[in-house]
Image: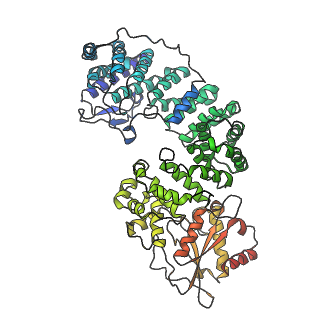
């Protein structure tokens, strides 16, 4: 019964591909698997086949084919961990090798639709030699008839022929993009066939075909590797160590799904036998699929292995592990991470700039400050900031994230912040603004934390057309970096004459970026941060003789939390804050009456101070500076100082801050 069903599927598949190639079919099934399902999923096919022969694709398919250097390095490591027997399939040499133009044209100018799948594969193999010598790829129109024949008979390919064809395509000269004429038709058809055959393949065979899809640079665009990862995720504990490492490599390649928790349990069985390179491949799988490691027991061996191999570890390996350590940071590992940075400081000189940037970022997730590493990294990178090949705009942004978070002033021969400000204004960086379109607003916002403003670039970033192009016309999609720049202009840049956010647009955007002030009786469950805020508010109410003398509001709409506003008159008495009626959320609320004394009390919780200290992060220091600029005296209530006090002591603590 199954064989009859399989033949029906083959027949239906063949007919659909034939109609599609002759422009008689408006839709093409997303994969052969859809024929087994009553509810089919379809992708739209372009009507103008002279312009685009094939499925319309999204922007991520339109770029050139290339390999990431990190993936190339990881793939080379995999070659030392073989899991596939090279003799599973016998690869045959072509019966005929084309060497002349006439023979080449004669070979391709046949009615390949009436040929068998074996003859079609033989045709691709025969033309390979001539194409490699003359740099002809399959997007050449002379391949049209051969590709038509392949699409008609693709479902008849045996496993061996399928492998031979993929090997052959690897050898052909590179096409310009994934969507190139003919090439897209070939790989999308073969991708569907491979997915269809997965249930009948052994694990070794599946990995063998995954290797071909990676070498074709189609691991991320095609669906085969994604289906492979899904299938292996059912029982990953059955995988051998080598198979598990290969699986994580392909998770990194496809980047389409989270790493299942079962993979962590499987990895835990082998992690202590991994060397640093093998750990790096696993780390790439977690990081690139945006899956933090939940078992901290997996992070400890990684830290230990880096310390063990710190003098010889490759920079790509170290970078990959540092990424996942930061992404999966656990508060119980802070001491170990600090010790890790102590071991790595002597190695900074030999490591790449990119690796050093990720070393600087290691403490940003848990806000722990390692001065020695940041100091030495800053000294090294300041010498390369002016070279786009050594320091990309993206890397400059990441370095600034670490430096400004801790409001760090590294002891370098020049001011690193001023050097960055000058560098982003250089003409050589203009191309990178287009490549990393969100980096420039982020860098400008980070520099604003140091009260450094680049008016010309801010004018570009705040251009309404650019905002719509990058973030869309909807206020909820606006970046906080752009909103923050606009607020800083209003507070600190009276001489700025360039573009600004539309007032209504900013007000609507602010609603998506702030958290509403908590109350004890709110419907939503109170967090620890909410309770801390409300405790501070209640304590302040006792000092100012009642809650009516308190006003809570977002004075600066670019900050998430609201502030507690109190007011003193000329006689030194607390009075009810008034004059905020003319403001709405999204406005910068200047102190209403300059003749009165205004205080903005800022509850600073554990996420806004450097770990294990009472030193506020750079963002809070910026908030204090901006509050002063608009007429308020900022008062920071540090969580670690406040919470340990008794009720009377809390009142005295805040009173002393005010006076």
Q: Residue furthest front?
A: 413
Q: Position of residue 238 (x, y in %)?
A: 63, 26
Q: Looking at the figure, which quarter contains the N terminus?
A: top left
- In the picture, measured across the screen, residue 415 lies left or right of residue 40, that is right
Q: Looking at the figure, which quarter contains the C terminus?
A: bottom right
Q: Residue furthest top?
A: 95
Q: Is residue 92 above or below residue 249?
A: above
Quadrant of the rendered image containing residue 130: top left
Can residue 133 be seen here? The reply is yes
- In the picture, measured across the screen, residue 260 lies left or right of residue 436, that is right
Give the number of callouts.
0
Q: Position of residue 555 (x, y in %)?
A: 52, 73
Q: Position of residue 494 (x, y in %)?
A: 44, 74
Quadrant of the rendered image containing residue 541: bottom right
For the point 25% across and 32% down, the residue is: 49
Q: Position of residue 496 (x, y in %)?
A: 41, 70
For the point 34% across and 58% down, the residue is: 465
- Front-most of 655 and 55? 655
- In the picture, measured across the screen, residue 502 lies left or right of residue 544, that is left
For the point 51% across and 47% down, the residue is: 391
Q: Is residue 379 above or below residue 162?
A: below
> What colour scheme was applied to this rendering of the protein?
rainbow
- Front-most of 311 and 571? 311
For the point 51% across and 80% down, the residue is: 591
């Amino acid at each position: 019964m199954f064989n009859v069903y399989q033949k029906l599927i083959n027949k239906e598949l063949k007919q659909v591909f034939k109609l599609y190639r002759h422009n008689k079919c408006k839709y093409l099934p997303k994969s052969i698997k859809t024929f087994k399902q009553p509810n089919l999923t379809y992708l739209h096919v372009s009507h103008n086949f002279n312009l685009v022969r094939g499925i319309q694709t999204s922007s991520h398919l339109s770029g050139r084919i290339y390999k990431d250097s990190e993936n190339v390095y990881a793939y080379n490591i995999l070659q030392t961990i073989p899991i596939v027997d090279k003799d599973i399939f016998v690869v045959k040499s072509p019966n005929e090798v084309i060497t002349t133009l006439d023979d080449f044209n004669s070979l391709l100018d046949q009615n390949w639709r009436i040929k068998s799948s074996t003859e079609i594969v033989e045709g691709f193999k025969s033309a390979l030699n001539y194409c490699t010598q003359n740099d002809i790829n399959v997007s050449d129109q002379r391949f049209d008839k051969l590709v038509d024949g392949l699409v008609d008979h693709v479902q008849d390919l045996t496993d061996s022929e399928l492998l031979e064809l993929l090997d052959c395509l690897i050898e052909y000269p590179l096409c310009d993009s994934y969507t190139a004429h003919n090439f897209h038709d070939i790989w999308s058809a073969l991708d569907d066939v491979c997915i269809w055959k997965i249930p009948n393949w052994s694990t070794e065979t599946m990995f063998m075909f995954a290797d071909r899809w990676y070498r074709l640079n189609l691991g991320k665009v095609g669906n085969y590797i994604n289906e492979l990862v899904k299938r292996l995720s059912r029982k990953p504990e059955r995988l051998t160590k080598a198979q598990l490492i290969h699986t994580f490599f392909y998770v990194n390649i496809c980047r389409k799904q989270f790493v299942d928790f079962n993979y962590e349990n499987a990895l835990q069985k082998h992690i202590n036998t991994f060397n640093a390179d093998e750990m790096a491949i696993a780390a790439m799988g977690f990081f690139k699929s945006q899956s933090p490691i939940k078992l901290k027991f997996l992070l400890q061996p990684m830290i230990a292995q880096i310390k063990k191999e710190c003098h010889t570890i490759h920079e790509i390996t170290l970078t990959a592990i540092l990424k996942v350590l930061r992404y999966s940071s656990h508060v119980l590992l802070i001491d170990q991470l600090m010790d890790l940075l102590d071991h790595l400081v002597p190695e900074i000189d030999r490591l790449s700039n990119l690796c050093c940037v990720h070393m600087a970022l290691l403490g940003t997730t848990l806000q722990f400050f390692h001065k020695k590493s940041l100091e030495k990294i800053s000294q090294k990178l300041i010498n390369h900031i002016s070279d786009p090949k050594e320091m990309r705009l993206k890397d400059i942004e990441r370095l600034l994230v670490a430096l400004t978070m801790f409001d760090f002033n590294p002891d370098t021969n020049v001011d690193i912040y001023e050097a960055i400000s000058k560098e982003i204004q250089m003409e050589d960086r203009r191309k990178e603004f287009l490549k990393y379109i969100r980096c420039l607003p982020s860098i400008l916002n980070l520099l604003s934390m140091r009260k450094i403003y680049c008016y010309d670039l801010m004018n570009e970033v705040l251009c309404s057309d650019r905002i719509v192009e990058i973030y869309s016309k909807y206020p909820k999609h606006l970046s906080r970096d752009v909103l923050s720049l606009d607020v800083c202009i209003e507070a600190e840049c009276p001489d700025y004459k360039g573009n600004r956010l539309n007032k209504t647009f900013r007000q609507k955007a602010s609603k998506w970026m702030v958290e509403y002030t908590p109350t004890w009786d709110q419907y939503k469950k109170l967090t620890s941060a909410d309770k801390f805020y409300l405790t501070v508010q209640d304590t302040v109410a006792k000092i100012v003789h009642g809650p009516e003398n308190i006003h809570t509001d977002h004075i600066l709409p670019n900050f998430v939390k609201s502030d507690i506003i109190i007011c003193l008159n000329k006689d030194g008495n607390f009075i009810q804050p008034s004059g905020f009626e003319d403001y709405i959320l999204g406005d910068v609320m200047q102190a209403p009456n300059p003749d009165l004394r205004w205080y903005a009390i800022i509850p600073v919780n554990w996420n806004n101070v450097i770990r294990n200290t009472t030193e506020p992060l750079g963002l809070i220091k910026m908030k204090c500076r901006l509050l002063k600029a608009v007429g308020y005296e900022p008062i920071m209530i540090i969580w670690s100082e406040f919470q340990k006090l008794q009720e009377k002591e809390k009142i005295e603590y805040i009173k002393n801050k005010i006076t």
